[in-house]
Amino acid sequence: MLKRFRNNKADDFESRRMQATALSAIGQHEEAIAVYEELVTERPTDRALLADYVAMLIETERFERAEQLLQQ
């Protein structure tokens, strides 16, 4: 499944969100962050998206970015 996302460069929001979640789950946090950042730029008020992203940032000890997002 992850290969499909990478090869097709999924362009719909929910597919890219699933891609970010999958990347995070398998420990590819830098790639997950890149996807999450694109998604947050597109939908900065999506609370579910922000919750998922902030949780991943906290798990990976990226506290500064997590705090920035929470203060928006």
Image (spheres, rainbow, N blue to C red):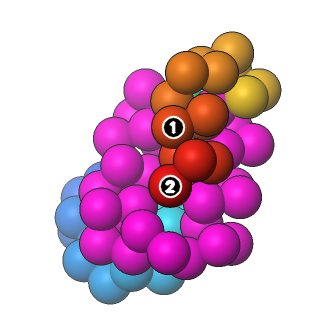
Q: Are marks 1 and 2 in contact (CB under 8 Å)?
A: yes
Name the residue carrying label 2.
Answer: 72
Secondary structure under badge 1? helix
Name the residue carrying label 1.
Answer: 68
Residue count near mark 1 (Cα–Cα under 10 Å), binned few <14, some 14–19, many ≥20: few
Q: CA distance from mark 1 to mark 2?
A: 7 Å
Q: How many marks do you count on the picture?
A: 2
Looking at the image, which is closer to me, 38 or 26? 38
Secondary structure under badge 2? loop
Residue under the image location 68 percent in, 72 percent down: 48
Q: Is residue 1 above or below residue 28?
A: below
Looking at the image, which is closer to me, 25 or 1? 25
Asked if residue 26 can be seen in this view, the reply is: no
The quadrant holding residue 31 is top left
Asked if residue 71 can be seen in this view, the reply is: yes
Q: Which residues are magenta?
A: 30-57
Amino acid beneath label 1: Gln
